[in-house]
Image: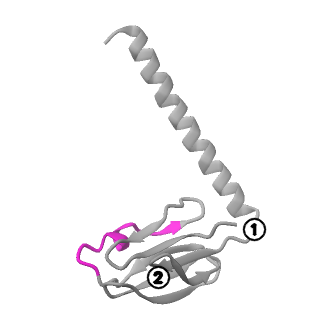
Amino acid sequence: MKKKELYILIAIAAAAVIALLVMKQINANNAASGSSVKVQITHAGEVVQEFDPSVDAVYHITGSYGTLDVEVKDGSWHVTNEDCPNHICSKTGWVSVANYQPIICLPNEVVVQIAEQ
């Protein structure tokens, strides 16, 4: 590998790390500012439940394959007790505004994501 190629790879990696840190800081600032974030649970593209992540609760959703539960606690949420063959959505773990990623259960056609504002 030539020096020029190595410098380009290092620059790309540094830019990616900086972009990730900036996005994390923006998400943390949004969470700390008390902005009213809503999370939606959709089934087959239709909103079936909307919740405030700051309110602890458990939501029972019926999907195309079976049922699943979404537990909300301390500003975070995760999927529990889903009727899916691989349990991938529950393996996603706890999600919050600060470390956001959508939770997608393909067999049930259920998506848990932050609502667009």
Q: In this view, which residue lies farthest toward the top?
A: 3
Residue depicted at x 49% and y 75%: 45
- Magenta span of residues: 84-95
Q: Is residue 93 magenta?
A: yes
Vertical side of 81 occupied by 115: above or below: above
Residue depicted at x 50% and y 23%: 11
Q: Secondary structure at mark 2?
A: strand
Dot 1 alpha-carbon crowd within 10 angstroms: few under 14, some 14 to 19, many 20 or more: few
Residue 102: image location, x then y, percent:
48, 65
Instruction: Please state which amino acid type lies under the numbered disc 1.
Output: Gly
Instruction: Please state which amino acid type lies under the numbered disc 2.
Output: Val
Residue depicted at x 64% and y 55%: 27
Residue 95: image location, x then y, percent:
50, 67
Left or right side of 79 for 72: right
Classify residue 85 by image quadrant: bottom left
Q: In this view, which residue lies farthest toward the left?
A: 85
Residue 75: image location, x then y, percent:
60, 73
Q: Secondary structure at mark 1?
A: loop
> Quarter holding the C terminus?
bottom right
Depth order, front residue of 46/81: 46
Vertical side of 4 occupied by 86: above or below: below
Q: Is residue 30 magenta?
A: no
> Quarter holding the N terminus?
top left
**Closer to viewer: mark 2 or mark 1:** 2
Left or right side of 32 for 3: left
| Residue behind mark 1 | 34
Dot 2 alpha-carbon crowd within 10 angstroms: few under 14, some 14 to 19, many 20 or more: some
Q: Specify the label residue 70 is tagged with.
A: 2
Classify residue 92 by image quadrant: bottom left
Residue 86: image location, x then y, percent:
24, 72
